[in-house]
Amino acid sequence: MINKVMEFAKEKLGNSYRFRHTLAVAEEAKDIASFMKVDTERIYIAALMHDTARGLDSEDMHNEAKKYKINISTLEEKRPILLHGLVAANWLIDKLNIVDWEIYEAICLHTTGAPNMGKMAAALFMADKLAITEGSHIDESLLNARKLLPNEIERAFLWCFAYSFQYLINNNQELHPVSIEAWNYYCKKENLEVLFGKR
């Protein structure tokens, strides 16, 4: 199954930075999955798929979203790139005939996160932010966040939201309402403890 998904990712992304990022995220996801007691093979599949729709232009992204009856928010109408995880998750079922709710959820939520997300979704969300891709800018904040694993994984998880927010704020971009909702949800210690199996 992994080989089939790998070939699909190569077909969609080619020999690009995005494909190198995908491989880096897949390896990071396996590491984080081992801390969180998440199935490493299945999260590897989720990671290979997560950005496969990233290369679609705005028109094609909208068309794919409509094809799969994805609800498009006002923000996603303005920034169709935010739909790429939802489209990729539907491709997993439609084009690769892989039906797995946890994998589907992880791909859908890897950009925004969400309140009450599953462990696999949380692990992929973190891997996407914490993976180091060859040729990418690496700042001290990222390196420090990586050092929080595995002993302070809750802090690393919250850092992923804060880092994403800071990037969007610095670029005068709107914050996704689902991400804000997730941040507010996970700021409550008891919700973090449930996610990471400490309650």
Image (tube, helix red, strand yellow):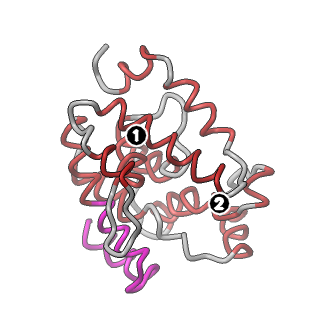
- The amino acid on which the numbered mark 2 sits, given as a three-letter code, is Tyr
For the point 44% across and 19% down, the residue is 191
In percent of the image, x 54 and y 36: which residue is there? 114
User: Quarter holding the C terminus?
Assistant: top left
Sooner in the amino-acid sequence: mark 2 or mark 1: 2
Inspect the magenta stretch and tell me whether residue 20 lies in it.
yes
Q: Nearer the viewer, mark 2 or mark 1?
A: 1
Give the residue drawn at x 65%, y 60%.
68
Pinpoint residue 97: horizontal percent, then vertical percent: 41, 63
* Residue at image mark 2: 68
Main secondary structure found in the magenta portion: helix
Q: Nearer the viewer, residue 135 or 34?
A: 135
The Cα–Cα distance between marks 2 and 1, rounded to whole angstroms, is 24 Å
**22 falls in the magenta region:** yes
- Residue furthest toward the front? 140
Residue at x 49%, y 28% (from the top left corner): 116
Q: What's the residue type where badge 1 is placed?
A: Ala
Other-residue count near label 1 (Cα within 10 Å), few / some / many at <14 / 14–19 / ≥20: many
